[in-house]
Image: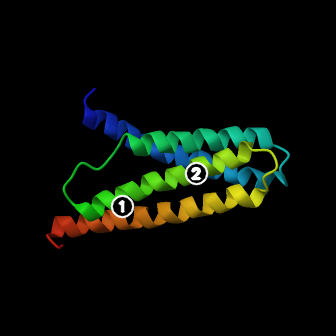
Amino acid sequence: MDKTQVGRACEALAPVGLILVATATLVPLFSGGFHHMDLMRWLYAAGALLMLVARLFSPYRGTDLRLRRLVRMQAWSALFFVAAAVFLFLPGTAPRDWLALTMAGAVVQVIASVMIPHRMQQLKDGKK
């Protein structure tokens, strides 16, 4: 496999990791509490790690600096999710710790996900 095929495969894995993170975040809501904490921890950690690997191995290789920064923002959101996963495994932490990092990662992810197609369209149209 060459670099573009690896990059495309990693780009396909990122949404799977995001779905795992979202599912693990919703487990306490639908189960009525933190009864399934072990399942939730491992599901969240797997999704966060999958997102991090996908974002690190699919960098933007173009020349546009703004688009490169937006793609890098997605890697930062994956790092937020990994940090939240660490808080899930640390004893003595409150649920607000991992929830705060999850929300921060989600905000960064949403901003980048909206702005990347917008910037690509601008480049396609020939605008700076």
Q: Is residue 110 above or below residue 128?
A: above
Q: Residues within 10 Å of mark 2 (few under 14, many from 20)?
A: many
> For the residue labelled by badge 1, is the local secondary structure a helix, a strand or a loop?
helix
Find the distance from the CA under tag 2 to the CA under tag 1. 17 Å
Q: Which residue occupies 58% across, 63% down?
A: 104
Q: Earlier in the sequence, mark 2 or mark 1?
A: 1
Q: Residues within 10 Å of mark 1 (few under 14, many from 20)?
A: many
On-image quarter of the C terminus: bottom left
| Disc marking residue 81 | 2
Q: Nearer the viewer, residue 6 or 72?
A: 72
Q: Position of residue 95 (x, y in %)?
A: 77, 57
Q: Position of residue 78 (x, y in %)?
A: 51, 50
The picture quadrant where one finds residue 74 is: bottom left
Residue lying furthest left:
126
Q: Nearer the viewer, residue 75 or 112?
A: 75
Residue under label 1: 70
Amino acid of disc 2: Phe
Amino acid of disc 1: Leu
On-image quarter of the N terminus: top left
Colouring? rainbow
Q: Which residue occupies 34% across, 62% down?
A: 116
87 sits to left or right of 48: right
> For the residue labelled by badge 2, is the local secondary structure a helix, a strand or a loop?
helix
126 sits to left or right of 12: left
